[in-house]
Image: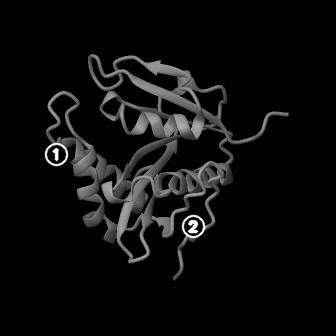
């Protein structure tokens, strides 16, 4: 069965024409073993840099729940040309904490955007984002919000700013005291 949602060269990237040369597809249970080390790299204490295994386990449970249908989450993975999972991103109905940053009653939220180190700056994040935006539109979401906490100041913040422009707000203490997250918003339906 071909469950590809994105094939090489189909992601638009007019700024620098870097296109992911792999495949974007729905996450599967057999991907969990490849996803874990990606999460273990990016889920860390913002002050000490030490990994947070309990938080990784929470995210893994969320991904599994999205795959098996017990949670209202959709995850897609990026698979490189050799068939290795090199990134993931998720979509959920907007969370209660992010509703204040929406301008629409029908918004979705991007979550868990994580890419393997050796695949950064190769169009993986953009391809994952584009695929989830298309899925969101097929579900009649008319807006996307995404937040990124302070541990991603040098990685996630520049990515989301490149994708969606300046952040539209700050979610104060979203990730604990001092864990203010920047929030971006993107309209999926062009304004009339």
Q: Which residue is mark 1?
A: 53
The quadrant of the rendering that contains the C terminus is: top right
Q: Nearer the viewer, residue 181 or 82?
A: 82
Q: Few, some or many C-alpha atoms within 10 Å of disc 2 (few <14, some 14-19, many ≥20)? A: some
Which residue is at a point 54% across and 57% down the rendered structure image?
127
Find residue 84 and name its label.
Answer: none
Q: Nearer the viewer, residue 189 or 17?
A: 17
Q: Which residue is mark 2?
A: 5
- What is the x, y in percent for residue 143? 64, 37
Q: How is the image coloured?
A: one colour
Direction bottom: furthest residue:
1
Is residue 35 shown left or right of residue 144?
left
Which residue is at a point 23% across and 42% down the rendered structure image?
55
Is residue 13 shown left or right of residue 180?
right
Q: Secondary structure at mark 2?
A: loop
Q: Nearer the viewer, residue 8 or 141?
A: 8
Q: Quadrant of residue 173?
A: top left
- What is the x, y in percent for residue 43? 25, 42
Residue 97, visible in the rendered structure: no
Q: CA distance from mark 2 to mark 1?
A: 30 Å
Which residue is at a point 41% across and 50% down the rendered structure image?
71
- Above or below for 87 versus 8: above
- What is the x, y in percent for residue 25? 49, 67
Mark closer to the chain start, 2 or 1: 2
């Amino acid at each position: 069965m071909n469950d590809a949602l994105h094939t090489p060269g189909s992601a638009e990237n007019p700024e620098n024409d870097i296109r992911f040369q792999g495949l974007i597809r729905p996450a599967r249970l057999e991907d969990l073993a490849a996803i874990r080390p990606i999460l273990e790299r990016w889920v860390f204490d913002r002050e000490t840099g030490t990994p947070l295994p309990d938080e990784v386990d929470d995210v893994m449970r969320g991904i599994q729940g999205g795959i098996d249908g017990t949670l209202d989450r959709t995850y897609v993975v990026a698979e490189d040309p050799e068939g290795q999972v090199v990134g993931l991103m998720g979509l959920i109905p907007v969370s209660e904490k992010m509703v204040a940053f929406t301008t629409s009653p029908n918004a979705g939220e991007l979550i868990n955007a994580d890419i393997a180190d050796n695949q950064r700056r190769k169009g993986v994040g953009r391809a994952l984002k584009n695929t989830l935006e298309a899925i969101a539109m097929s579900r009649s979401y008319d807006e996307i919000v995404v937040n990124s906490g302070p541990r991603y100041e040098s990685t996630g913040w520049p990515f989301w700013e490149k994708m969606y422009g300046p952040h539209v707000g700050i979610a104060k203490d979203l990730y604990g005291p001092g864990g203010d997250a920047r929030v971006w918003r993107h309209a999926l339906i062009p304004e009339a």
